[in-house]
Amino acid sequence: MHALQKLESVVGTRAQAVPCKQAGFCRPRQQTSNGSSITEFLLLAFMDTRELQLLHFWLFLGIYLAALLGNGLIITAVVCNHHLHTPMYFFLLNLSLLDLASISTTVPKAMANSLWDSKAISYLGCAAQVFLFIFFMSAEFSLLTIMSYDRYVAICKPLHYGTILGSRACVHMAAAAWGSGFVYALLHTGNTFSIPLCQGNALDQFFCEIPQILKLSCSDAYLREVWVIVVSVFVVFVCFVFIVLSYVQIFRAVLKIPSEQGRHKACSTCLPHLAVVSLFISTVMVAYLKPPSISSPLLDMVVAVLYSVVPPAVNPLIYSMRNQELKDTLKKLIQSALSQQQ
Protein backbone atom coordinates (compact mmCIF):
# COMPACT_ATOMS: atom_id res chain seq x y z
CA MET A 1 0.00 0.00 0.00
CA HIS A 2 2.83 2.42 0.77
CA ALA A 3 4.35 1.71 -2.63
CA LEU A 4 1.02 2.49 -4.33
CA GLN A 5 0.70 5.69 -2.28
CA LYS A 6 4.18 6.67 -3.42
CA LEU A 7 3.09 6.28 -7.03
CA GLU A 8 -0.13 8.20 -6.38
CA SER A 9 1.99 11.08 -5.13
CA VAL A 10 3.68 11.13 -8.51
CA VAL A 11 0.31 11.88 -10.13
CA GLY A 12 -0.41 14.52 -7.52
CA THR A 13 2.85 16.34 -8.19
CA ARG A 14 2.65 16.02 -11.98
CA ALA A 15 0.38 19.05 -12.19
CA GLN A 16 3.07 21.08 -10.44
CA ALA A 17 5.90 19.96 -12.72
CA VAL A 18 7.31 22.73 -14.88
CA PRO A 19 7.76 21.91 -18.59
CA CYS A 20 11.38 22.25 -19.57
CA LYS A 21 10.70 24.91 -22.21
CA GLN A 22 8.84 27.08 -19.75
CA ALA A 23 11.65 26.80 -17.18
CA GLY A 24 14.28 27.52 -19.79
CA PHE A 25 16.11 24.24 -19.28
CA CYS A 26 15.61 22.57 -22.66
CA ARG A 27 18.18 22.25 -25.39
CA PRO A 28 17.69 21.04 -28.98
CA ARG A 29 16.36 17.50 -28.77
CA GLN A 30 15.68 14.55 -31.02
CA GLN A 31 13.17 11.71 -30.86
CA THR A 32 14.23 8.86 -28.55
CA SER A 33 13.12 5.27 -28.29
CA ASN A 34 10.55 5.90 -25.57
CA GLY A 35 8.80 8.66 -27.49
CA SER A 36 9.68 11.41 -25.00
CA SER A 37 12.23 13.21 -27.26
CA ILE A 38 14.45 13.86 -24.20
CA THR A 39 18.18 13.57 -24.84
CA GLU A 40 19.37 14.65 -21.40
CA PHE A 41 18.19 15.19 -17.84
CA LEU A 42 19.02 18.05 -15.49
CA LEU A 43 20.00 17.30 -11.89
CA LEU A 44 18.89 20.31 -9.85
CA ALA A 45 19.39 19.20 -6.22
CA PHE A 46 22.30 21.57 -5.46
CA MET A 47 21.73 24.33 -8.00
CA ASP A 48 20.63 27.14 -5.62
CA THR A 49 23.93 28.90 -4.93
CA ARG A 50 27.58 28.44 -5.83
CA GLU A 51 28.49 28.15 -2.13
CA LEU A 52 26.03 25.27 -1.70
CA GLN A 53 27.49 23.54 -4.76
CA LEU A 54 31.02 23.75 -3.35
CA LEU A 55 29.85 22.57 0.09
CA HIS A 56 28.19 19.60 -1.57
CA PHE A 57 31.38 18.86 -3.50
CA TRP A 58 33.66 18.84 -0.46
CA LEU A 59 31.18 16.92 1.69
CA PHE A 60 30.71 14.23 -0.94
CA LEU A 61 34.45 14.11 -1.61
CA GLY A 62 35.13 13.37 2.07
CA ILE A 63 32.47 10.67 2.22
CA TYR A 64 33.64 9.14 -1.07
CA LEU A 65 37.29 9.01 0.04
CA ALA A 66 36.22 7.44 3.35
CA ALA A 67 34.24 4.78 1.45
CA LEU A 68 37.18 4.09 -0.88
CA LEU A 69 39.62 3.82 2.02
CA GLY A 70 37.42 1.72 4.31
CA ASN A 71 36.19 -0.75 1.72
CA GLY A 72 39.61 -0.88 0.06
CA LEU A 73 41.25 -1.82 3.36
CA ILE A 74 38.70 -4.57 4.00
CA ILE A 75 39.16 -6.00 0.50
CA THR A 76 42.95 -5.91 0.88
CA ALA A 77 42.81 -7.49 4.35
CA VAL A 78 40.60 -10.38 3.24
CA VAL A 79 42.65 -11.03 0.11
CA CYS A 80 46.07 -10.86 1.81
CA ASN A 81 45.35 -12.76 5.04
CA HIS A 82 44.71 -16.46 4.43
CA HIS A 83 43.21 -16.74 7.93
CA LEU A 84 40.33 -14.64 6.66
CA HIS A 85 39.55 -16.98 3.77
CA THR A 86 36.32 -18.13 5.39
CA PRO A 87 32.68 -17.83 4.23
CA MET A 88 31.97 -14.84 6.48
CA TYR A 89 34.89 -12.81 5.13
CA PHE A 90 34.24 -13.97 1.57
CA PHE A 91 30.76 -12.46 1.77
CA LEU A 92 32.19 -9.36 3.47
CA LEU A 93 34.58 -9.00 0.53
CA ASN A 94 31.64 -9.08 -1.87
CA LEU A 95 29.77 -6.55 0.27
CA SER A 96 32.71 -4.14 0.12
CA LEU A 97 32.90 -4.53 -3.66
CA LEU A 98 29.18 -3.74 -3.96
CA ASP A 99 29.53 -0.73 -1.65
CA LEU A 100 32.39 0.65 -3.72
CA ALA A 101 30.49 0.08 -6.95
CA SER A 102 27.21 1.62 -5.74
CA ILE A 103 28.74 4.82 -4.36
CA SER A 104 30.94 5.17 -7.47
CA THR A 105 27.80 5.07 -9.63
CA THR A 106 26.27 8.26 -8.22
CA VAL A 107 28.75 10.36 -6.25
CA PRO A 108 31.51 11.14 -8.83
CA LYS A 109 28.99 12.51 -11.35
CA ALA A 110 27.30 14.59 -8.65
CA MET A 111 30.66 15.97 -7.51
CA ALA A 112 31.67 16.81 -11.08
CA ASN A 113 28.40 18.66 -11.69
CA SER A 114 28.83 20.70 -8.52
CA LEU A 115 32.48 21.50 -9.16
CA TRP A 116 31.95 22.58 -12.77
CA ASP A 117 28.55 24.23 -12.16
CA SER A 118 26.80 21.81 -14.50
CA LYS A 119 23.39 20.17 -14.33
CA ALA A 120 23.25 17.85 -17.33
CA ILE A 121 23.44 14.08 -17.56
CA SER A 122 22.76 12.41 -20.90
CA TYR A 123 19.71 10.22 -21.43
CA LEU A 124 21.87 7.12 -21.85
CA GLY A 125 24.03 8.16 -18.91
CA CYS A 126 20.94 8.48 -16.74
CA ALA A 127 19.67 5.06 -17.84
CA ALA A 128 23.09 3.53 -17.12
CA GLN A 129 23.17 5.18 -13.69
CA VAL A 130 19.71 3.84 -12.81
CA PHE A 131 20.62 0.35 -14.01
CA LEU A 132 23.96 0.16 -12.17
CA PHE A 133 22.62 1.66 -8.95
CA ILE A 134 19.66 -0.73 -8.77
CA PHE A 135 21.94 -3.62 -9.75
CA PHE A 136 24.41 -3.00 -6.93
CA MET A 137 21.82 -2.08 -4.29
CA SER A 138 19.57 -5.09 -4.95
CA ALA A 139 22.59 -7.42 -5.10
CA GLU A 140 23.73 -5.98 -1.76
CA PHE A 141 20.37 -6.69 -0.14
CA SER A 142 20.47 -10.27 -1.48
CA LEU A 143 23.98 -10.63 -0.09
CA LEU A 144 22.94 -9.31 3.33
CA THR A 145 20.22 -11.96 3.37
CA ILE A 146 22.79 -14.64 2.55
CA MET A 147 25.09 -13.31 5.28
CA SER A 148 22.32 -13.71 7.85
CA TYR A 149 22.08 -17.37 6.80
CA ASP A 150 25.85 -17.68 7.19
CA ARG A 151 25.65 -16.40 10.76
CA TYR A 152 22.70 -18.72 11.48
CA VAL A 153 24.64 -21.79 10.33
CA ALA A 154 27.83 -20.69 12.14
CA ILE A 155 26.08 -20.28 15.51
CA CYS A 156 23.15 -22.69 15.40
CA LYS A 157 24.83 -25.52 13.44
CA PRO A 158 28.56 -25.05 14.02
CA LEU A 159 29.44 -28.72 13.47
CA HIS A 160 27.95 -28.64 9.97
CA TYR A 161 29.29 -25.20 9.05
CA GLY A 162 32.08 -26.43 6.78
CA THR A 163 29.78 -28.90 5.05
CA ILE A 164 26.86 -26.55 4.44
CA LEU A 165 28.95 -23.52 3.49
CA GLY A 166 31.77 -25.00 1.48
CA SER A 167 33.73 -22.93 -1.00
CA ARG A 168 31.56 -24.02 -3.92
CA ALA A 169 28.33 -23.23 -2.06
CA CYS A 170 29.64 -19.78 -1.11
CA VAL A 171 30.58 -18.99 -4.72
CA HIS A 172 27.16 -20.14 -5.93
CA MET A 173 25.34 -18.00 -3.33
CA ALA A 174 27.43 -14.92 -4.12
CA ALA A 175 26.83 -15.46 -7.85
CA ALA A 176 23.10 -15.77 -7.16
CA ALA A 177 23.14 -12.42 -5.32
CA TRP A 178 24.95 -10.67 -8.18
CA GLY A 179 22.81 -12.40 -10.81
CA SER A 180 19.50 -11.59 -9.14
CA GLY A 181 20.57 -7.96 -8.86
CA PHE A 182 21.41 -7.86 -12.57
CA VAL A 183 18.05 -9.34 -13.62
CA TYR A 184 16.08 -7.07 -11.30
CA ALA A 185 17.96 -3.97 -12.50
CA LEU A 186 17.41 -4.94 -16.13
CA LEU A 187 13.67 -5.36 -15.56
CA HIS A 188 13.31 -2.16 -13.52
CA THR A 189 15.38 0.04 -15.83
CA GLY A 190 13.80 -1.23 -19.02
CA ASN A 191 10.33 -0.71 -17.60
CA THR A 192 11.07 2.79 -16.28
CA PHE A 193 12.66 4.12 -19.47
CA SER A 194 9.92 2.67 -21.69
CA ILE A 195 7.48 5.10 -20.06
CA PRO A 196 6.84 8.26 -22.15
CA LEU A 197 8.01 11.43 -20.40
CA CYS A 198 6.05 14.64 -21.00
CA GLN A 199 6.75 16.86 -17.97
CA GLY A 200 10.14 18.29 -18.86
CA ASN A 201 13.56 16.90 -18.03
CA ALA A 202 14.41 18.42 -14.61
CA LEU A 203 15.01 16.05 -11.66
CA ASP A 204 15.09 17.41 -8.09
CA GLN A 205 17.84 15.02 -7.08
CA PHE A 206 21.64 14.70 -7.32
CA PHE A 207 21.40 11.45 -9.31
CA CYS A 208 18.88 9.71 -11.56
CA GLU A 209 16.39 8.27 -9.09
CA ILE A 210 13.36 6.34 -10.34
CA PRO A 211 10.71 8.18 -8.26
CA GLN A 212 11.97 11.49 -9.68
CA ILE A 213 11.88 10.13 -13.25
CA LEU A 214 8.31 8.89 -12.74
CA LYS A 215 7.24 12.44 -11.89
CA LEU A 216 7.96 13.32 -15.52
CA SER A 217 5.78 10.55 -16.99
CA CYS A 218 2.79 11.18 -19.23
CA SER A 219 -0.80 10.62 -18.10
CA ASP A 220 -1.18 7.21 -16.41
CA ALA A 221 1.87 5.67 -18.08
CA TYR A 222 3.53 5.38 -14.67
CA LEU A 223 1.09 2.55 -13.81
CA ARG A 224 3.36 0.21 -15.79
CA GLU A 225 5.79 0.53 -12.91
CA VAL A 226 3.22 -0.52 -10.26
CA TRP A 227 3.65 -4.25 -10.82
CA VAL A 228 7.41 -4.06 -10.69
CA ILE A 229 7.25 -2.16 -7.39
CA VAL A 230 4.66 -4.58 -5.94
CA VAL A 231 6.91 -7.53 -6.80
CA SER A 232 9.89 -5.66 -5.35
CA VAL A 233 8.11 -4.99 -2.07
CA PHE A 234 7.09 -8.65 -1.84
CA VAL A 235 10.65 -9.90 -2.44
CA VAL A 236 12.09 -7.42 0.06
CA PHE A 237 9.48 -8.46 2.62
CA VAL A 238 10.32 -12.16 2.17
CA CYS A 239 14.05 -11.45 2.59
CA PHE A 240 13.34 -9.30 5.65
CA VAL A 241 11.26 -12.06 7.26
CA PHE A 242 14.06 -14.55 6.52
CA ILE A 243 16.62 -12.26 8.20
CA VAL A 244 14.39 -11.72 11.24
CA LEU A 245 13.73 -15.46 11.67
CA SER A 246 17.45 -16.19 11.30
CA TYR A 247 18.32 -13.76 14.08
CA VAL A 248 15.56 -15.06 16.33
CA GLN A 249 17.19 -18.49 16.12
CA ILE A 250 20.66 -16.97 16.52
CA PHE A 251 19.80 -15.09 19.72
CA ARG A 252 18.12 -18.17 21.14
CA ALA A 253 21.30 -20.15 20.53
CA VAL A 254 23.50 -17.37 21.95
CA LEU A 255 21.49 -17.28 25.20
CA LYS A 256 22.14 -21.01 25.63
CA ILE A 257 25.93 -20.59 25.46
CA PRO A 258 27.19 -21.17 29.04
CA SER A 259 30.30 -18.96 29.02
CA GLU A 260 30.18 -15.18 28.86
CA GLN A 261 33.21 -15.18 26.56
CA GLY A 262 31.41 -17.47 24.11
CA ARG A 263 28.35 -15.23 24.06
CA HIS A 264 30.52 -12.17 23.51
CA LYS A 265 32.35 -13.82 20.61
CA ALA A 266 29.09 -14.88 18.98
CA CYS A 267 27.62 -11.40 19.33
CA SER A 268 30.77 -9.77 17.94
CA THR A 269 30.25 -11.59 14.64
CA CYS A 270 26.48 -10.97 14.46
CA LEU A 271 25.94 -7.41 15.68
CA PRO A 272 27.89 -5.71 12.86
CA HIS A 273 25.84 -7.55 10.25
CA LEU A 274 22.61 -6.76 12.09
CA ALA A 275 23.60 -3.08 12.26
CA VAL A 276 24.37 -2.96 8.52
CA VAL A 277 21.06 -4.67 7.68
CA SER A 278 19.13 -2.27 9.92
CA LEU A 279 20.82 0.77 8.35
CA PHE A 280 20.20 -0.50 4.82
CA ILE A 281 16.55 -1.48 5.27
CA SER A 282 15.52 1.55 7.34
CA THR A 283 16.97 4.12 4.91
CA VAL A 284 15.55 2.40 1.82
CA MET A 285 12.11 2.06 3.44
CA VAL A 286 12.07 5.74 4.36
CA ALA A 287 13.12 6.65 0.81
CA TYR A 288 10.53 4.62 -1.08
CA LEU A 289 7.70 3.98 1.39
CA LYS A 290 7.35 7.29 3.24
CA PRO A 291 3.84 8.85 3.11
CA PRO A 292 3.33 11.26 0.19
CA SER A 293 2.08 13.93 2.61
CA ILE A 294 5.59 14.45 4.06
CA SER A 295 7.42 14.39 0.74
CA SER A 296 9.44 17.47 -0.23
CA PRO A 297 12.49 18.10 -2.45
CA LEU A 298 14.76 18.72 0.57
CA LEU A 299 13.54 15.64 2.44
CA ASP A 300 13.84 13.48 -0.69
CA MET A 301 17.43 14.64 -1.17
CA VAL A 302 18.42 14.03 2.47
CA VAL A 303 16.87 10.55 2.44
CA ALA A 304 18.62 9.75 -0.85
CA VAL A 305 21.95 10.69 0.73
CA LEU A 306 21.18 8.47 3.72
CA TYR A 307 20.47 5.35 1.69
CA SER A 308 22.85 5.80 -1.26
CA VAL A 309 25.91 7.60 0.11
CA VAL A 310 26.19 7.03 3.87
CA PRO A 311 26.00 3.17 4.10
CA PRO A 312 28.99 2.45 1.79
CA ALA A 313 31.13 4.75 3.94
CA VAL A 314 29.82 3.54 7.29
CA ASN A 315 29.68 -0.23 6.66
CA PRO A 316 33.48 -0.78 6.87
CA LEU A 317 33.56 1.08 10.18
CA ILE A 318 30.70 -1.01 11.57
CA TYR A 319 32.35 -4.30 10.58
CA SER A 320 35.80 -3.37 11.87
CA MET A 321 34.72 -1.99 15.25
CA ARG A 322 33.81 -5.32 16.91
CA ASN A 323 35.84 -7.72 14.76
CA GLN A 324 39.20 -8.33 16.41
CA GLU A 325 40.57 -10.48 13.59
CA LEU A 326 39.84 -7.80 11.04
CA LYS A 327 41.27 -5.05 13.24
CA ASP A 328 44.48 -7.02 13.80
CA THR A 329 44.88 -7.65 10.08
CA LEU A 330 44.28 -4.00 9.21
CA LYS A 331 46.76 -2.91 11.88
CA LYS A 332 49.44 -5.19 10.42
CA LEU A 333 48.76 -3.93 6.90
CA ILE A 334 49.05 -0.29 7.99
CA GLN A 335 52.23 -0.97 9.98
CA SER A 336 53.73 -2.83 7.02
CA ALA A 337 52.90 0.04 4.65
CA LEU A 338 54.42 2.62 7.03
CA SER A 339 57.59 0.58 7.53
CA GLN A 340 58.09 0.27 3.76
CA GLN A 341 57.82 4.04 3.36
CA GLN A 342 60.49 4.57 6.02
Image (cartoon, rainbow, N blue to C red):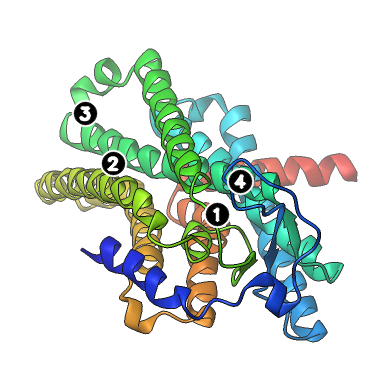
Relative to 106, does residue 288 appear above or below in the rendering? below
Nearest to viewer (mark 4 / mark 2): 4
Q: What residue type is labelled 3?
A: Pro
**Dot label at residue 175:** none
**Res 55 → quadrant:** bottom right
Mark pair 2, 1: CA separation = 19 Å
Mark 3–mark 4 distance (CA, rounded to whole Å): 45 Å
Q: How many tags in the picture? A: 4
Label 4 crowd (10 A; few <14 / some 14-19 / many >=20): some
Q: Mark 3 points at which residue?
A: 158
Is residue 265 visible in the rendered image? The answer is no
Amino acid at pointer 4: Ala
State the residue position of label 4: 127
Single out the mark in the foreground, 3 or 4. 4
For residue 88, which quarter of the picture?
top left
Residue sticking out furthest to the right: 342
